[in-house]
Amino acid sequence: MNMTIDDVKFDDRGLVPAIVQDAHTHGVLMLAYMNAESLRRTLETGETWFWSRSRAQLWHKGETSGHTQRVVDAFVDCDGDAIVVRVHPAGPACHTGQESCFHNVIEVADQKSGGAEEIAVAELGDLGEVLNSLYALVETRKRERPQGSYTTYLFEQGLDKILKKLGEEASETIIAAKNEDRGALTKESCDLLYHLIVLLVERGVTLTGVRDELVVRRVEHK
């Protein structure tokens, strides 16, 4: 259903929360607030505009930093009181230089789930950096065994449990691929990589060792 600014339900301050999402990675970049004018400018200029509650003024994202956000599309939720704006960012969203404003980790304890609750790193980078950070985090969990950590639970259950979970995640990844659901396949691949790293840590296999073996195979298979 196509909607207009008139369909948006602004609160008693004339504001609506706007979630900004990377259109390519689908990662959440930031949460800010818009009033009717900033929403209008966002839709008309194709770049994000917001209302600063602290400064009580409009602000154009990236106006000083150059880290603008080119709008791909925008959606309003079923209640009309929240907006999602999908963008192509021209740099990090956070004033700290992080790709996303949501880079501080809150640990979630859920021992019933095989999901990668602990795939969270303090600083996001390329895939190699993320995997190295995750490996280091899993090593720390094995060494320190904090209570409430799903990774602690896996290590305390032992190798057979880790292997069982890895097998389950491999099966779920295959199912997601067969269903041609890219979003589900991406999520299941993350779960699979997480459990694989837990296994590698448990058996003392390093990512450097895996990398070196891949390099050898690349040379051999040229």
Image (spheres, rainbow, N blue to C red):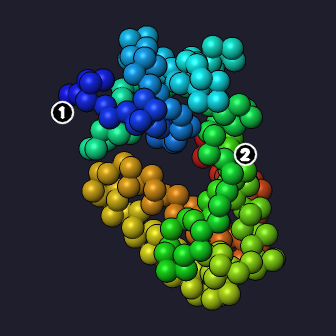
CA separation in Å, label 2 and label 1? 38 Å
Residue 189 location, x and y as percent?
48, 58
Residue 48 location, x and y as percent?
49, 21
- Which residue occupies the foreground of this view, 124 or 201? 124
Above or below, 105 against 100 in this view is below
Residue 130 location, x and y as percent?
68, 50
Q: Amino acid at mark 2?
A: Glu
Name which quarter of the figure residue 41 lies in.
top left
Sequence-first disc among 2 and 1: 1
Q: Which mark is residue 1?
A: 1
Q: Amino acid at mark 1?
A: Met
Q: Which mark is residue 108?
A: none
Name which quarter of the figure residue 123 lies in.
top right
Name which quarter of the figure residue 10 lies in.
top left
Above or below, 81 against 43 in this view is below
Q: Secondary structure at mark 2?
A: loop
Give me the residue at 38% from left, 11% from top.
44
Question: Is the N terminus in the top left, top right, bottom left or bottom right quadrant?
Answer: top left
**Can you name the residue that lies furthest to the top here?**
45
The answer to whether residue 112 of the structure is visible from this angle is yes
The answer to whether residue 211 of the structure is visible from this angle is no
- Which residue occupies the foreground of this view, 82 or 168? 82
Q: Secondary structure at mark 1?
A: loop
Q: Which mark is residue 123?
A: 2
